[in-house]
């Protein structure tokens, strides 16, 4: 096993660990370790809500989830000799749930998927699903099942939802300016258009006092993907993947977290993956001057790993850029994907699932989302591919009509709006 550079004790909160990570992006957050190019190391990763979500049959915790405290990131890790303009090579050598532990923390034999309430995060279909729901998944090796979504079992496609390098001071200012300008176009929108810097709940490694206060007031939230990688939620960043990250500060200052047991393309419920704590083994190296050599000046490029589940039979649903009210939109691929997802949800309800169970399933299972046509005016066409092998009944259309399954207790809903 490689050296553990960022250990975690499952019994302690994230800000009381031996080494303190961070939940904001800023160039002045000190690295917790410096490694040489060619090093392989392990980082333990805390579940993104630091244990706030429980293994129970209530979605009140999803409703009340403290979004100002995410994500709990391991790092930063500086790579010796890396300089702005270089590319940082990051190989995912291994990844998994918390090893050999059972307990109340996601990753200790279980994980969860949540539909976030409209007034606390929202999601891809927030207008159709404005309330909070939750599904808990039990892990058995690489497979998972849920008491809240019965008749389904699938192999997880483990990956980090979030990984990236630190921004430079100039890049951070650019983020805050453009996102602030967007917020200003509709400052009262629910959910908000973007998340501005928020000192409350900020965890900034070893920073204290006046320096902590300064950085907390400037640091960017970790919710979106940006030029540094960040919260990209790419399900194909599995074991064996190689990622090339732009370097903006000396050392690169790589951070990682938000591990997922599985996820469908898009992480559509916002907490659409099966969230877990766990570990990740990374190998790092540097391409000097790589940003200019390869034209990678913003946003990482990657080579996906060859692992993960292999499904061969699919049922695909398509959608076009027409609203539910019948309004035509021009080549709106986002809307087209929403419509494809809604068609899949409607289809699954014919077998006995509730719409919320179907939505949670499409967020967690390894569905494939594709933009299938983006040039044929006025309609974009998007498709979502659902693996049929994950069901213990025949989900395909047939002459006898849909098999009626017992949906079980269903996905729990929060008691009251937040």
Image (cartoon, rainbow, N blue to C red):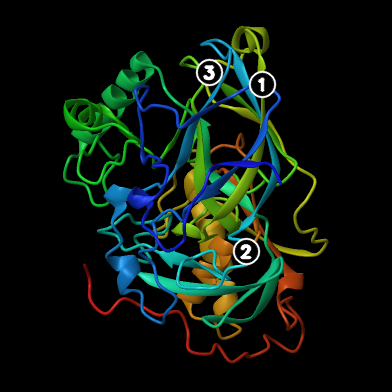
User: What x and y, as percent, mark residue 74?
Assistant: 48, 41
Question: Which image quadrant is residue 243 in?
Answer: top right
The residue that label 1 is drawn on is: 37
Is residue 142 found left or right of 272 in the rendered image? right
Q: Looking at the image, which is closer to me, 84 or 225?
A: 84
User: What x and y, as percent, mark residue 270?
Assistant: 43, 55
User: What x and y, as percent, mark residue 240?
Assistant: 75, 41
Q: Judge whether 282 appears above or below 411 on screen.
A: above
Precedes in sequence: disc 3 or disc 2: 3
Which quarter of the figure is the C terminus placed in? Answer: bottom left
Give the total number of marks visible in the rendering.
Answer: 3
Q: Is residue 263 visible?
A: no
Crowding at mark 3 (Cα within 10 Å: few <14, some 14-19, many 20+): many
Is the Cβ of the residue at disc 2 closer than 8 Å to that at disc 1?
no
Is residue 5 found left or right of 324 in the rendered image? right
User: On residue 365, which mark appears?
Assistant: 2
Q: Judge whether 84 appears above or below 88 on screen.
A: above
The residue that label 3 is drawn on is: 247
Q: CA distance from mark 2 to mark 1?
A: 36 Å
Q: Which residue is drawn at the image coordinates 58% and 60% (left, top)?
A: 98
Precedes in sequence: disc 1 or disc 3: 1
Q: Which residue is drawn at the image coordinates 22% and 39% (left, top)?
A: 198
Q: Looking at the image, which is closer to me, 272 or 261?
A: 261
The residue sitting at the right extreme is: 312
Precedes in sequence: disc 2 or disc 1: 1
Mark 2 or mark 1, which is nearer to you? 1
Is the Cβ of the residue at disc 1 closer than 8 Å to that at disc 3?
no
Q: CA distance from mark 3 to mark 2?
A: 33 Å
User: What x and y, as percent, mark residue 325?
Assistant: 38, 59
Name the secondary structure under disc 2.
Answer: loop
Q: Judge whether 72 appears above or below 186 on screen.
A: below
């Amino acid at each position: 096993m490689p050296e553990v550079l960022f250990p975690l004790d499952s019994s302690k909160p994230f800000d009381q660990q031996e080494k303190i990570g961070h939940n904001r992006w800023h160039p002045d957050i000190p690295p917790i370790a410096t490694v040489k190019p060619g090093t392989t190391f392990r980082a333990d990763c805390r579940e993104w809500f630091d244990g706030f979500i429980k293994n129970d049959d209530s979605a009140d915790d999803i409703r009340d989830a403290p979004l100002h405290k995410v994500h709990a990131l391991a790092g930063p890790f500086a790579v010796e000799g890396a300089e702005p303009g270089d590319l940082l090579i990051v190989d995912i050598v291994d990844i998994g749930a918390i090893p050999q532990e059972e307990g109340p923390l996601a990753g200790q034999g279980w994980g969860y998927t949540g539909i976030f309430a409209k007034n606390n995060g929202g999601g891809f279909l927030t207008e159709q699903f404005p309330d909070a729901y939750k599904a808990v998944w039990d892990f058995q090796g690489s497979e998972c099942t849920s008491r809240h979504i019965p008749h389904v079992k699938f192999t997880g496609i483990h990956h980090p939802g979030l990984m990236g390098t630190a921004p430079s001071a100039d890049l951070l200012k650019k983020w805050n300016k453009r996102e602030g300008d967007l917020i200003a176009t509709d400052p009262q929108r629910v959910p908000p258009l973007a998340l501005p810097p928020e000192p409350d709940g900020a965890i900034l490694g070893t920073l204290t006092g006046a320096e902590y206060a300064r950085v907390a007031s400037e640091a960017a939230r970790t919710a979106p993907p940006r030029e540094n990688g960040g919260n990209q939620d790419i399900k194909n960043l599995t074991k064996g993947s190689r990622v090339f990250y732009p370097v903006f500060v000396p050392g690169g200052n790589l951070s990682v977290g938000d591990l997922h047991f599985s996820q469908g393309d898009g992480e559509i419920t916002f907490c659409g993956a099966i969230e877990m704590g766990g570990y990740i083994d990374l190998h790092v190296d540097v391409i000097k001057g790589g940003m200019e050599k390869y034209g990678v000046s913003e946003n990482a490029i990657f080579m996906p790993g060859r692992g993960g589940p292999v499904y061969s039979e699919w049922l695909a649903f398509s959608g076009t850029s027409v609203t539910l009210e019948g309004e035509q939109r021009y080549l709106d691929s986002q809307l087209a994907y929403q419509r494809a997802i809604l068609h899949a949800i409607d289809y699954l309800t014919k077998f006995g699932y509730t719409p919320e169970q179907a939505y949670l399933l499409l967020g967690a299972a390894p569905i494939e989302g594709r933009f299938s046509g983006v040039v044929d005016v006025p309609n974009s066409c998007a498709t979502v591919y659902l693996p049929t092998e994950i069901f213990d009944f025949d989900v395909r259309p047939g002459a006898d009509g849909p098999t009626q399954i017992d949906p079980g207790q269903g996905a729990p809903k929060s008691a009251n709006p937040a």
